[in-house]
Image (spheres, helix red, strand yellow):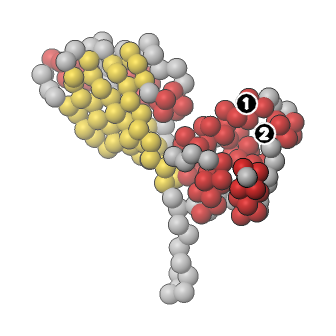
C-alpha cells in the first residue's frame, strides 16, 4: 500500500445479548438481541446455546459452589468476537455477551438480499413480489437489519452499509428516494 492509498474502512456492529440463567444452567429469559441471534432461548441450557468451547455445563454451578461473583472472558461465539460476562445475582446468573462482528458478516443472506432491494428504491410489496415472500417477512428482515446495525431508519441502514464497504447498487440514489418517500 502506497502513501496515497487509504484502507477501506470496515465498520463493526456491537450488540449485547442478555440471558438470565437459573442455578442449573437453564435460560429463564433473554433479550431481543439474544432472540435475533439464537432464536427462542428460554428453556435451553446456556452452555449448549453458547457452544461447549465457550462454556462448560458446570460453569453456572461453579459460580454458586465457589461463591464467585463473576467470570469475564474474551471468546468467539458462533463466529462473533465477544466479551462474555457471567455475573451471579442472588439465585440467578446474568450472562452478558457483547458481540462484535463486521457489518458484512452481521446480516443473513436473506437480510442482505432484502436491504439491497431497499437500496434500489423498491417498496416492501415490490420486494416481496420479487423474492416470492410476504410483505410481513420483508418488514421483519428490515427490522432485523436495523436492529443489527443499531439504526432507526431504512435510509440510515443503507448509509451505514454503503460506508462500510458493503456492495449496494446505487445506494446514494436510494437514500434520496427514501427521503422523498417520507415527505
Write down the residue under mark 1: 137
Which mark is in front, 1 or 2? 2
In the picture provided, is 35 more to the left or to the right than 90?
right
Q: Residues within 10 Å of mark 2 (few under 14, many from 20)?
A: some
Give the Cα distance between marks 1 and 2.
9 Å
Q: Position of residue 64 (x, y in %)?
A: 18, 18
Residue 158: percent from left, percent from top = 65, 54
Indicate which disc residue 124 carries: 2
Classify residue 50 as left or right of residue 136: left
As drawn, the label of residue 98 is: none
Q: How many C-alpha atoms fall within 10 Å of the one at disc 1: few (<14), some, or many (≥20)?
A: some
What residue sits 21% from the left and 22% below the top? Answer: 89
Q: Are marks 1 and 2 in contact (CB under 8 Å)?
A: no
Instruction: Measuring from the top left, give residue 153's x and y in whole percent.
Output: 62, 47
Q: Nearer the viewer, residue 55 or 5?
A: 5
State the residue in front, 133 or 100. 133
Helix or strand or loop: what does disc 2 sit on?
helix
| Residue 93 horizontal/vertical position (percent) | 27, 22
Q: Nearer the viewer, residue 181 or 90?
A: 181
Return the residue found at the far front.
183
Name the residue: 58% across, 61% down. 164
Q: What residue is rendered at 61% in x and 51% in y?
A: 157
First in sequence: mark 1 or mark 2? 2
Residue extending farthest to the bottom is 3
Question: Quick check: can you spot residue 161?
Answer: no
- Relative to 153, 133 lies left or right: right
Q: How many marks?
A: 2
SS label for mark 1: helix
Q: Is residue 121 above or below residue 45?
A: below
Amino acid at each position: 500500500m502506497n502513501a496515497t492509498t487509504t484502507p477501506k474502512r470496515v465498520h463493526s456492529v456491537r450488540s449485547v445479548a442478555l440471558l438470565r440463567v437459573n442455578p442449573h444452567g437453564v435460560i429463564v429469559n433473554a433479550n431481543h438481541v439474544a432472540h435475533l441471534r439464537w432464536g427462542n432461548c428460554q428453556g435451553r441450557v446456556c452452555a449448549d446455546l453458547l457452544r461447549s468451547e465457550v462454556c462448560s455445563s458446570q460453569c453456572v454451578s461453579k459460580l454458586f459452589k465457589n461463591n464467585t461473583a463473576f467470570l469475564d472472558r474474551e471468546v468467539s461465539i458462533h463466529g462473533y468476537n465477544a466479551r462474555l460476562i457471567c455475573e451471579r445475582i442472588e439465585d440467578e446468573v446474568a450472562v452478558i455477551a457483547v458481540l462484535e462482528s463486521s457489518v458484512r458478516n452481521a446480516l443473513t443472506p436473506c437480510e442482505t438480499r432484502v436491504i439491497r432491494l431497499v437500496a434500489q428504491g423498491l417498496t416492501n410489496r415490490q420486494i416481496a413480489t420479487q423474492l416470492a415472500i410476504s410483505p410481513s417477512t420483508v418488514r421483519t428482515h428490515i427490522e432485523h437489519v436495523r436492529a443489527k446495525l443499531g439504526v432507526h431508519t431504512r435510509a440510515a441502514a443503507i448509509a451505514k452499509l454503503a460506508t462500510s464497504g458493503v456492495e449496494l447498487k446505487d445506494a446514494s440514489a436510494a437514500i434520496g428516494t427514501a427521503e422523498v418517500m417520507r415527505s
